[in-house]
């Protein structure tokens, strides 16, 4: 079947997908929770629907918006590409995919991948390492984490506590090491490793804070990962752009989870192939992997900034080019909600992390002191963000 002329993009934050689609020369409409200005600028049309980062989309609102922007039809007139937000709702993904051409993992694949019992049983059968898991809090919960089944973004992770098991959660022992994501393309049988990115959490939490590539990983650990990706791709039927979350310590590693959809890897790995990662994602879903892959020539990084208090974005703002996920002018940002994403590229990991830290500090300081800011000129009341 030929690729549709236009794609429906659905994610909690649709900006990375929308920018990647535009870079790859694809037409797109977008549904997400935020409607940031650069998301809207990258799409032909967009809609903001009800929901939040922890619980995901409000189903009826999402389906109604999808029908307005990209009506289901037989044969399908629109493609469907999704990002974060549907891992815990494969039933909702199936309803979205009905009457649209799905470019991504099928609902059954998402179910197999995000069911912890099935996933870790698969790892055990394959002889792959992973931290110990449990269905209930261990008698001594120290050193254990509680995670929600199908959760994404880290906001669902908390230290385990003694007592009754929480609904829809599982427990995983913490292991020492560096959090690293392996981004890869898959065609249902084989995988093509794109690269490794080191991850970090937002201060004082387990929420996703950002990532930098390339990661520091031993040659032996790196050499073992392609065979792991091939095995998981075959067993789970993975297609398109995915990532494997690992904890790496020297030559050893533990597998945490597979993220069966595009995500923050778009911000640090896109731009080196003429087809763009969006185009490579579509091709991989059709069973075509690239013969080779060239990593970005520089170190690249991205960081998500969260509000530590309720903020108001001034009515006049000149966002630098390195700010993405830009909230609307005058938007109210609640405490704990994402403010924006900061991007950087530099010749080395150290230089790019320094750039990310400096740019993050600049956004925070200027938001908190907008009257004297070079970035912001005035603060007035208006609409809500996040």
Image (cartoon, helix red, strand yellow):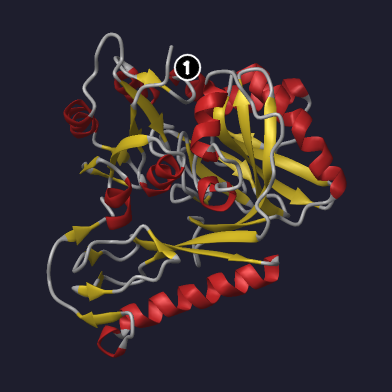
The residue depicted at 40 percent of the width and 30 percent of the height is 81
Packing grade of label 1 (10 A; few <14, some 14-19, many >=20) is some
Q: Left or right? Give the position of 293 relative to 343.
A: right
Please state the horizontal and vertical placement of residue 24, each as a whole percent of the image.
46, 39
Instruction: Looking at this view, name the residue that lies furthest to the left.
Output: 381
Q: Is residue 176 above or below residue 230?
A: below
Q: Is residue 109 above or below residue 362?
A: above
Q: Nearer the viewer, residue 205 or 23?
A: 23
* Quarter of the picture holding the N terminus: top left
**Whole-percent x and y of residue 14?**
36, 44
Q: Quadrant of the C terminus?
A: bottom left
Q: Do we see residue 34 in this rendering?
A: no
In the image, residue 79 sits, relative to residue 73, either above or below, namely below
- For the point 71% across and 34% down, the residue is 292
Residue 94, how many percent across, how many down?
Answer: 35, 19
Judge by depth and name the residue closer to the eye, 52 or 325.
Answer: 325
Number of callouts: 1
Element at label 1: helix
**What percent of the width, then of the height, locates residue 354?**
61, 74
Give the image quarter of residue 10: top left
Q: Residue at x 62, y 54 (%)?
A: 142
Q: Is residue 148 left or right of residue 245?
A: left
């Amino acid at each position: 079947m030929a690729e549709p002329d236009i794609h429906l993009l659905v994610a909690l934050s649709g900006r990375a997908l929308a920018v990647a689609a535009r870079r790859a020369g694809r037409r797109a409409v977008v549904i997400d929770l935020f409607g940031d200005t650069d998301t809207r600028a990258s799409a032909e049309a967009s809609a903001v629907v009800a929901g939040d980062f922890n619980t995901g989309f409000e189903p009826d609102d999402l389906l109604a918006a999808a029908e307005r922007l990209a009506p289901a039809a037989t044969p399908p007139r629109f493609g469907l590409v999704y990002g974060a937000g549907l891992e815990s709702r494969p039933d909702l993904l199936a309803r979205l995919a009905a009457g649209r051409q799905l470019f991504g993992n099928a609902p059954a694949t998402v179910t197999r991948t995000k069911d912890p019992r099935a996933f870790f049983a698969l790892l055990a059968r394959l002889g792959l390492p992973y931290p110990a898991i449990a269905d209930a809090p261990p008698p001594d919960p120290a050193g254990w984490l509680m995670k929600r089944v199908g959760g994404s973004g880290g906001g669902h992770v908390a230290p385990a506590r003694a007592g009754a098991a929480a609904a829809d959660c599982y427990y995983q022992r913490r292991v020492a090491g560096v959090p690293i994501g392996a981004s890869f393309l898959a065609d249902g049988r084989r995988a093509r490793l794109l690269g490794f990115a080191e991850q970090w959490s937002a201060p004082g939490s387990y929420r996703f804070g950002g990532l930098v590539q390339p990661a520091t990983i031993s040659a032996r650990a790196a050499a073992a990962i392609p065979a792991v990706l091939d095995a998981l791709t075959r067993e789970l039927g993975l297609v398109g752009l995915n990532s494997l979350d690992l904890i790496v310590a020297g030559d050893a590693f533990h597998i945490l989870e597979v993220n069966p959809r595009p995500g923050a890897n778009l911000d640090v790995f896109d731009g080196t192939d003429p087809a763009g990662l969006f185009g490579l994602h579509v091709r991989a879903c059709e069973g075509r992997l690239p013969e080779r892959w060239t990593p970005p020539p520089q170190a690249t990084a991205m960081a998500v900034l969260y509000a530590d208090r309720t903020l108001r974005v001034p009515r006049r703002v000149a966002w630098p080019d390195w700010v993405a996920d830009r909230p609307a002018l005058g938007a109210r940002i609640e405490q704990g909600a994402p403010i924006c994403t900061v991007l950087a590229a530099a010749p080395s990991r150290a230089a790019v992390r320094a750039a990310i830290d400096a740019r993050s500090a600049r956004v925070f300081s200027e938001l908190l002191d907008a009257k004297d800011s070079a970035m912001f000129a005035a603060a007035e009341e208006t609409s809500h963000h996040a």
